Amino acid sequence: MPPSAVVEAPPPYRVVRPARQTTPLVFASPHSGTHYRADFLATARLDPLALRRSEDSFVDELFACAPGHGAPLLAATFPRVFCDVNREPWELDPSMFDGPLPAWVNSASPRVGAGLGTIARVVATGEPVYRRKLPFAEAEARVRECWQPYHAALAALIEETKAQFGICLLIDCHSMPTHPAHGTPPADFVLGDAHGTSCAPRATRLVEETLLGLGYRVRRNDPYAGGYVTRHYGMPREGVHALQIEIARRLYMDEARLERAPGMPPLQRDLARLVAVLAGTDWSWLSR
């Protein structure tokens, strides 16, 4: 499906809430947005399919079961290539802009060096995104209109959950492309808890054991240990735990065409089993 560039812009995120929240879980899909603005497409040198390769396509659909198990689901509607909310708000590459950047911009992070800052210079395949340099005002607008509202919504969900249950376990949901460097056989899931610092090991272990029990290959923190969301919100000593889940795209989609594959329904059923296990767990021990 081509990006929806001609329709009116939706809000920058959507929250699907359960009829009643019954578990301290919050699910988030920051990279599954598919609304591509016409002015953005006009500045891009790549075709829509190439731009979409940076998406975590259909991840929000994979976890659409969460509200039915008593947990809210937050999903961005804008695409990752437009604004990446799994970065600091001001990780910007100076080479992308037509003038100097403010001194407070973080232009030295490894993500910026790879071309994958808050405003990406390249897509996942390494091809440059833009035909021309951007004004800094464009970055400011994207942070104001996309990054800030998404994080305000996420922070509010975490605070609401913590107020109700005393704790919160954030599951940050992503997908990963097939890549030779990911090993043989490649993992089906990678769990990132910032090497044990963003989430209680017992919680990570429960997710890992459940997925292993469903027949999947699971790795921890290799090659994805968690991005900005995991490290920023995961504060176990304050009752907030954050775990990043990366799902192999080959399990559920055609990676060339970016279309749902026959593996999607069975994966959805297995993820519903995972969510059911997590939602049925007594998490009170996290507050001890």
Image: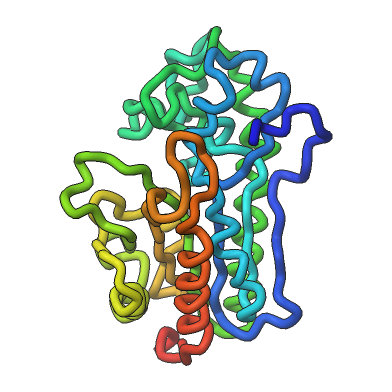
Q: Residue at x 78, y 42 (%)?
A: 10
Identified at 58% across, 77% down, the residue is 162
Q: In this view, does 187 lie above or below 199?
A: above
Horizontal side of 221 relative to 261 (left or right) equals left
The residue positioned 59% from the left and 58% from the top of the image is: 61
- Residue closest to the far right: 8
Furthest-left residue in this view: 184
On the question of residue 71 being in view, the answer is yes
* Whether residue 169 is situated above or below residue 39 in the rendered picture: below
Q: Which residue is drawn at 45% across and 72% down?
A: 270
Q: Where does the image place residue 37, in percent across and percent down from the top left?
A: 71, 28
Whether residue 231 is visible: no
Q: How many marks?
A: 0
Residue 148 x/y as whole percent: 64, 44
Left or right of residue 221: residue 65: right
Q: Name the image quarter holding the C terminus.
A: bottom left
Q: Which of 89 and 255 is in front in this view?
A: 255
Q: Residue furthest front?
A: 262
**In the rendered image, the vertical position of residue 32 relative to residue 257, given as above or below:** below
Query: Which picture quadrant has residue 113?
Result: top left
- Foreground of the two, 274 or 91: 274
Query: Which colour scheme appears in the figure?
Result: rainbow
Task: Examine the image and state in which quarter residue 49 appears.
Answer: top right
Can you give x and y, in whole percent of width and height, for residue 132 in the image? 55, 7
Please identify the quadrant where the N terminus is shown: top right
- In depth, the one of 6 and 145 nearer the eye is 6
Q: Position of residue 124 (x, y in %)?
A: 40, 31
